[in-house]
Image (tube, rainbow, N blue to C red):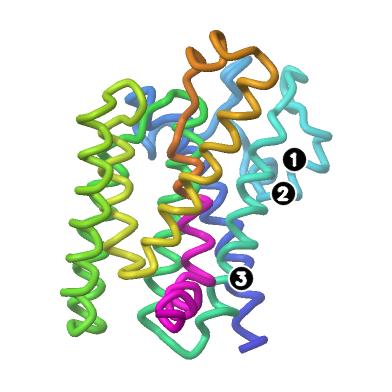
Amino acid sequence: MAPALAPAALFGLLIGSFLNVVAWRLPRGESLVKPRSHCTGCGTTVRAVDNVPLLSWALLRGRCRGCGERISARYPAVEALTAVLYVAVVAARWDDVLQIVLGLVLVTFLVPIAVIDLDHRIIPNKLTGPAAVLAIALGLALEPSFVPEKLVAGLAAGGFFFVAAVLKPNGMGMGDVKLAGVLGLYLGRAVAPAIFTGLILGVVAGAAIIARLGATAGRKTAVPFGPFLAVGALVALFAGDGLVDSYLDRF
């Protein structure tokens, strides 16, 4: 297992660098491949030597080589987070090819979804759609017997959030509904603790906002739910089956 962790970390850094591009360009309707990465301040194309994950940002001290404009620390943070998650998935699922593949793909989609939702309060169909298709395709290719469970979980999770969105349109968006369905396709029965964790985190965040701003202003403050679902999905990815088994053993 250990020899596989270094390649997982390196691959995670490279993918994380690309996910920064996705998170910036996708909600703006820009191409993900053209033009090449460039400074948002002066427009100068970023040279290959200045585009090495983590290292280049550190050597440049977080500033553009051309104009000196500050480069957000989010870029290396996303790269590092993706690398850590890739390593965690491989370490936790090293003996199960299907779970490794599904885990890596899920992480790859969750990172930009969370970042975009934080910035723009949207979860793009261009991410949830391909994520859903890949989940089914990978399941059919690697372990067809698991596909029915994941389809049921996806329908149940998406249906639960759809009802919530219909009953309270201002509290839940359709992007959250689609994301919940996608999580079911990847996590199967473990989507239950993912949703529960996301809801708990949302309630805690809402309570903190109300405590800080007051009840009237706090209730009017829009809080993106996608990042909470993403955290819940990560909890479920690494501990969801154990949590479900522990719950079922009590009854």
| 143 on left or right of 242 | left
What distance separates the C-alpha of mark 2 from that of mark 1?
Answer: 6 Å
Label 2 secondary element: loop
Q: Which amino acid type corresponds to the residue marked 1 in the rendered image?
A: Trp
Helix, strand or loop at mark 3: helix
Residue 86, x across and y down, in percent: 56, 66
Mark seen at residue 87: 3
Residue 152: image x %, image y %?
18, 65
Pointer 3 or 2: first along the chain: 2
- Magenta-colored span: 231-251
Label 3 crowd bin: few (<14), some (14–19), many (20+), radius 10 Å = many
Q: CA distance from mark 1 to mark 3?
A: 22 Å
Q: What residue appears at the point 62 percent right and 23 percent down from the top-left corner?
A: 209
Q: Which mark is residue 54?
A: 2
Identified at 72% across, 49% down, the residue is: 54
Taking depth in this image into account, of 85 and 246 the one nearest to the observer is 246
The residue that label 1 is drawn on is 57
